[in-house]
Amino acid sequence: MGVQGLATLLDNHRSIYRDVEFRRSRLVIDGSNLVHLLYFESGLDQNHGGEYAAFENLIERFFTALRTCEVEPYVVLDGGSDPTDKKLETVMQRAEQQIEKAHRAAVDGGKENILPVLAMWVFKQRLFRLKVPIAQCFGEADREIAALAYEWQCPVLSNDSDFYIFNLPAGMVPISYFQWADVNQNGSKSYIPCKRYYTSSFCIYFEIQHQLLPTFAALAGNDYVKLQKISWVQFAPKANKPLSRLVGLLCWLKDFEVPQEALEAAMELMGAKNQKKEKMLQSLSVGIEEYQLPPSSLTEFFKHGVVPQFPEESQQVGLVPDWIQLAVMQARMTADILDVLLLHSMSLSSPVSHKDLPSVNLTSRPLRQVMYGLLLGKKKSVKVEECDREGLQLKCTPIKPIFSQHTQQLELNSLHEVELSVRLKVLLEALRVQEELLNVLPPQLRLPVAVTCYWCIRARPPPDLKLLKSLVLGMCLKDTLRLSAAVEAESRCCHQKADTDVAHAFSQWQVCMKDSMHLNQLLDFPLPEPDTAGLYQGMLVHQLVHMMRTGRRLKRFLKTDQATVKRYRDMLFIVHQLRSRKVSKFSAGEQIAKAQRQPLNDHTNLQLYEDEDVATAIRSLARVQEELQLDDQLMVKTRYRTKERRNRCNKVELTRKEERRGIALL
């Protein structure tokens, strides 16, 4: 939703706002709006796939500032699409604009405000950890946000211009004027300087009746109303020429007391009669009704965890099970699931990508098809219409769900109650990996590594070894916030633009990660959900690729952190084993044992792999496995050997030699 040009109008009439010291209050936050504005206004890089560690830090600082000022935040997110198609034209138009902006960003390297693929995941996960109350609506959130703020008599935080129209007794605070990074003191009390808007101030300033505000929004044109253009300019004072359209409309509305009179007069201006008039009036009425607030459905959810009633037409046929409604409302499951269940559709985002390259969403389509099969169950004839880009065009394609031997036996109503081993088998079958090797890894790394294996097989063109190594190393490094900042400063200094092909490859990995996490959610988390903020730092990973391709050593990344080296080796080993078709007939134990039996200077068995790095990783993990499986007697010997190694490391020359060996794997 949004009234085009209204925010700009208010920016040019700032006396309408009130300067306030905001503190000690509830605050209902338009979460979807906040995610975009926090990321875009922070100056974080957008074209290398996202700076997630920095974004997570920004989120934490924002909510820490609120709590410092005794502000109680309640975050509300958008949910599924509008089933009535009232704003279909607007949605399609915006999707096409996003595709064009994503292409421009890829071509010239400029910032086009394309939200990175995993940014919303980072936002949700950080809010869960901070214990910030959060709700995800079943549909668009604007009216629910306004209704909750009305009931609680507290302001809304958003930059959405529709909140300038809703009747909010405590007003709204534009995010652009919310100076959360500059917390001030008034005596012993902390506050956030900001500007606050009230509809009463707007109506007094422009001399119109308060009840005409929704009529103003509808006649000005919003997401629901697209009328024949009226030349409102003729009613505007000449001094207001830059904003003459909205100012002219407001001047024209001064002569009316009630909405119906204004609507009839507008029909005369358009020359609308009979059926055309009725159709236009109906369209305007729909636009006006969107600003009438229902009783809040979120109050009981935030207070007692009570899920709001789902639309009756969906409940009658049992399309959305109760456990999914709860998970969606808690923002622990993507609302895209509602679109699949209710509309048999899926709208796919367009990350930064060149128009001549295929959509990155094609790589992860088989994962979504498995999800469609789980959601639609026995309705095998039903297809899901995926809306994705093809070149610079938005194209909707019917996609068949995928059913496997395991998924055919599962019922959506009881999916979360199925044995863990079965749900895990469905997930790993979709990712084409085996559980045995993944179990060697820490739980948090299992899903990212499985996804990386899937990406190596499915990505087009297939990623080369340097891309894989850079991605894995980026996941392993500690203090990525500091490293990313240093790399970003270096790239800006050199005016380094993102490599289009590298960005395309890593965007494919990100959508695979996103869709895998969606599938993992639907299966009620057979694998632990990874810490998304630590998985990928765009500028850093792109720089690692550049350094590897130009032959530069990465000593500054691994010089003193042997734990990072080990984690990197282990992950590379697992990825190469899982993606290797030649050794798939062996179990994990057999593969490791085979590596163990080879002398360390014997490379005959390493022809299955791509380079010495992987060979080193195999031997490293084989040693780890050997130590874990030794009996008590061998454990004593292991401790003896460990002590001996410590003594040997006291020799300076040997220490340097071993350091060089560790760095050489890159």
Image (tube, rainbow, N blue to C red):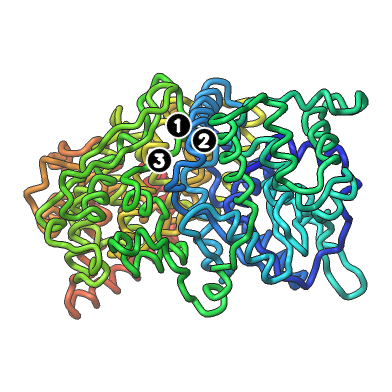
Q: Position of residue 584 (x, y in %)?
A: 11, 47
Query: Is the residue 357 above or below the residue 323 in the image?
Result: above
Report, in whole angstroms, how far the alpha carbon at label 3 lies from the one at label 1: 22 Å
Q: Is residue 87 left or right of residue 198?
A: left
The residue singled out by tag 2 in the image is: 48
Residue lying furthest front: 274
Residue at screen point 17% across, 42% down: 580
Query: Is the residue 147 above or below the residue 508 in the image?
Result: below
Q: Is residue 149 left or right of residue 136?
A: right
Q: Position of residue 517 (x, y in %)?
A: 36, 54
Quarter holding residue 566: bottom left
The residue singled out by tag 3 in the image is: 347
Q: Secondary structure at mark 1?
A: helix
Among numbered discs 3 and 1, the one appearing first in the sequence: 3
Amino acid type of disc 1?
Ala
Say which of 201 and 176 sits in front: 201
Q: Secondary structure at mark 2?
A: loop
